[in-house]
Image (spheres, rainbow, N blue to C red):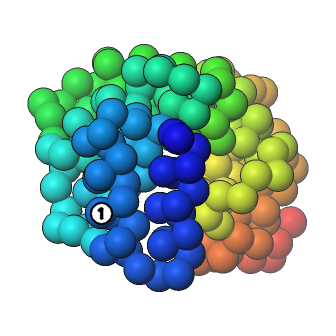
Amino acid sequence: KSAAHKNRAQCYMEMGDTVAFFNKNREAFEAGYNSVAHNLGNCYKNGWGTGIDFDKAFEAYSAGMEAQNVFSPVVPCQWETGMLLRDGKGCAADPERAMELFKAASDAGLIFAQYTLAEEYYKRQQWVEAMALCQTVAEREDRIPNAARASVCKMMARMYTHGRGVPADEAQARQWWDRAASYGDDDAGIISRWLGQNQ
């Protein structure tokens, strides 16, 4: 039944009926099927078929972290809950708890969590950890937004430029600036062209 509820709701989303998608997920969630918790959280977070409500999004995502069966969306809900905790949306900000959830989802292989955790390590100047995760994301072929890909490449370019977490390497830095530019990042494009003119 859990999978059936989830699949039925997904059909409405594919048809573009966000209201029906929201209603089906809400009904299933209220009936105790937490396999739809991630879908419902996304509805509240993004305003799909309902108003944006971060409190309810946090409630849904948090419920999704409680594994009840094989369909429980534990890993994506860990990442989403972490994002809300990091930003203090729908809950009190708790950066350290957010990091714990990012790590758990990253260790489980969720590329969005790996990217987010890489950014957090970079902000905290934990260069070795940031570089390791950036390399992991860069090597994966999962579909993530080009802006995220470019961000990873730019972090790597800067770390190679300044010798943070790795030995300084101008050739590697330029390679990653070029790659960031290939994902449509304007700033990386400017730097890449400038480096090309000053070889």
Residue of label 1: 23
In the picture, the quarter occupied by the C terminus is bottom right
Answer whether residue 174 is visible to the viewer in this image.
Answer: no
Seen from the viewer's position, the closer of residues 29 and 67 is 29
Going by the numbered disc 1, the residue's amino acid type is: Asn
Quarter of the image where one finds residue 140: top right
Seen from the viewer's position, the closer of residues 19 and 190 is 19
Q: Residue at x 51, y 31 (%)?
A: 72
Seen from the viewer's position, the closer of residues 194 and 173 is 173
- Relative to 188, residue 42 above or below: above
Looking at the rendered structure, the secondary structure element under dot 1 is helix
- Relative to 195, residue 144 above or below: above
Q: Residue at x 66, y 76 (%)?
A: 184
Seen from the viewer's position, the closer of residues 146 and 52 is 52
Answer whether residue 180 is visible to the viewer in this image.
Answer: yes
Q: Residue at x 32, y 19 (%)?
A: 97
Q: Residue at x 30, y 39 (%)?
A: 31
x, y percent for residue 110? 63, 36
x, y percent for residue 78? 44, 30
x, y percent for residue 126? 52, 22
Residue 123 placement, left or right of 141: left
x, y percent for residue 15? 53, 81
